[in-house]
Image (cartoon, helix red, strand yellow):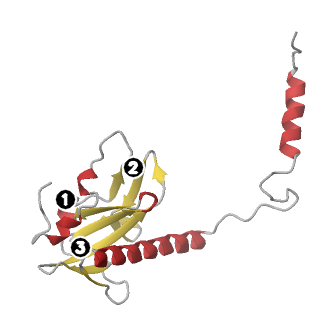
Amino acid sequence: MSKRRSPRDANQRRRKRLSSPKPSGQNPSLPAPPPESPRARELATKLRGELAELAFFYIAFKYGFIVSKPYGDSQRYDFLLDSGKTIYRVQVKCSTALLNGQYHINAHRRVNGRAVPYTLDEVDFIVAYIVPEDSWFILPLSHVLGITSLLFRPKRSRLTGLYDPYREAWHLLRQPDGLEIL
């Protein structure tokens, strides 16, 4: 016959479990580390973007493109990419975390705190790098014109993503106008 436990026993067990030292190696008597400052978050985001740009430079060069980076960061694009036929302005974006089952990319710039979509006068392609999957999406800006937020499904998703045809579509950068119909 099993012994019934009272709610009081359950509360005592819960208190004991919460007061026991954590196995993670943190000393419970030390205060928790301070939350990350907005400046630290901004620097981490900027570093992640710079690493994505380096990865783009490497892979584009590996595919035989001539890649140039403008001096400074006052241009709307990150790279000039020479396919041998055409020179394209490329904006590189990246994502590292799933949000509601999809990867999110901000496909815009900020003006006075407002999201402003890129225009055809500024950028020819948005290249989205999904870091955890090592996936590249090559998106002609004319196909996503006016959109400020892009959502990408993971490779193993059972559902087809809106931008799946652009996954690893490096061939679009070899087209004279970059607008091959998919």
Which kind of residue does numbered mark 3 sit on? Val
Q: Nearer the viewer, mark 2 or mark 1?
A: 2
Amino acid type assigned to the residue bearing label 1 in the image? His
Q: Which of 4 and 32 lies nearest the eye of the viewer?
A: 4
Which amino acid, by three-letter code, is at mark 2? Answer: Pro
Contact (Cβ within 8 Å) of mark 2 with mark 1: no
Query: Which badge, 2 or 3, is on the more N-terminal residue?
Result: 3
The percent coordinates of residue 101 (x first, y second) are 44, 45
Q: Earlier in the sequence, mark 3 or mark 1?
A: 3
* Residue under pointer 2: 154
Q: Please say if the residues under marks 3 and 1 sit with CB atoms less than 8 Å apart.
A: no
Question: How far is the residue under mark 2 from the one under mark 1?
Answer: 20 Å
Q: Residue at x 45, y 45 (%)?
A: 100
Q: Secondary structure at mark 2?
A: loop
Q: Quadrant of residue 24?
A: bottom right
Which quadrant is the C terminus positioned in?
Answer: bottom left
**Disc 2 + disc 3, Cβ < 8 Å:** no
Query: Mark 3 = which residue?
Result: 123
Which residue is pictured at 23% across the width and 59% down the height?
144
Q: Identify the residue under disc 1.
A: 143
Answer left or right for 82 relative to 35: left
| Quadrant assignment for the N terminus | top right
Name the front one of labels 2 and 3: 2
- Category of crowding for the residue at label 2, using alpha-carbon neighbours closer than 10 angstroms: few (below 14), some (14–19), many (at least 20): some
Q: Quadrant location of residue 116?
A: bottom left
Q: Residues within 10 Å of mark 3 (few under 14, many from 20)?
A: many
How far apart marks 3 and 1 lie (CA) works out to: 12 Å
